Image (spheres, helix red, strand yellow):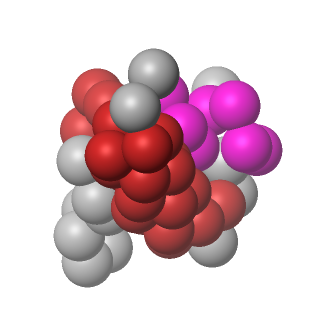
Amino acid sequence: MSKGWRWFLLAAFVVWTVLALQWTDFGCDYPEAYLAVLRFGTPEGLEFLPACAG
C-alpha cells in the first residue's frame, strides 16, 4: 500500500471518529456510534434518534 493511500485511510478514519463522537454525546456507545454515522450521518437538533433508542 502506498503512502498516499495510508494517509487517505488515516484521514478518513479520523473524520469518521469525529463524527462518531457526536453520537456518543447522545448516549450511544462507540460501536453504535460508528454504525450510526454510516446509517444516519450526523445527529441534528432534538429530533428522534433511532440509532440509540434501544
**In the image, what residue occupies the spot 43% across and 44% down?**
3
Viewer-proximal residue, 15 or 49? 15
Query: Can you give x and y, in whole percent of width and height, for residue 35 in the image?
Result: 48, 28
Image height check: is 45 above or below 10?
A: below
Q: Nearer the viewer, residue 48 or 26?
A: 26
Q: Tell me which segment is drawn in magenta.
A: 29-37
Image coordinates of residue 47 in percent, x first then y, are 25, 62
Quadrant position of the N terminus in the picture = top left
Query: Residue 50 colored magenta?
Result: no
In the image, is 37 to the left or to the right of 23?
left
Q: Is residue 22 above or below residue 7?
A: below
Res 24 visible = yes
Q: Residue at x 54, y 38 (%)?
A: 34
Single out the residue that lies furthest toward the front.
2
User: Taken as a whole, is the magenta stretch helix, strand or loop?
Assistant: helix
Up/down of 30 relative to 2, above or below:
below
Residue at image coords 25%, 38%: 40
Q: Quadrant of the C terminus?
A: top right
Report the front residue among 17 and 54.
17
Q: Position of residue 33 (x, y in %)?
A: 57, 43
Instruction: List x then y, in percent, for residue 27.
Output: 69, 57
Answer whether residue 50 is visible to the viewer in this image. Answer: no
In this view, the residue farthest toward the bottom is 45
Query: From this viewpoint, which residue is outermost toward the top?
Result: 1
Badge count:
0
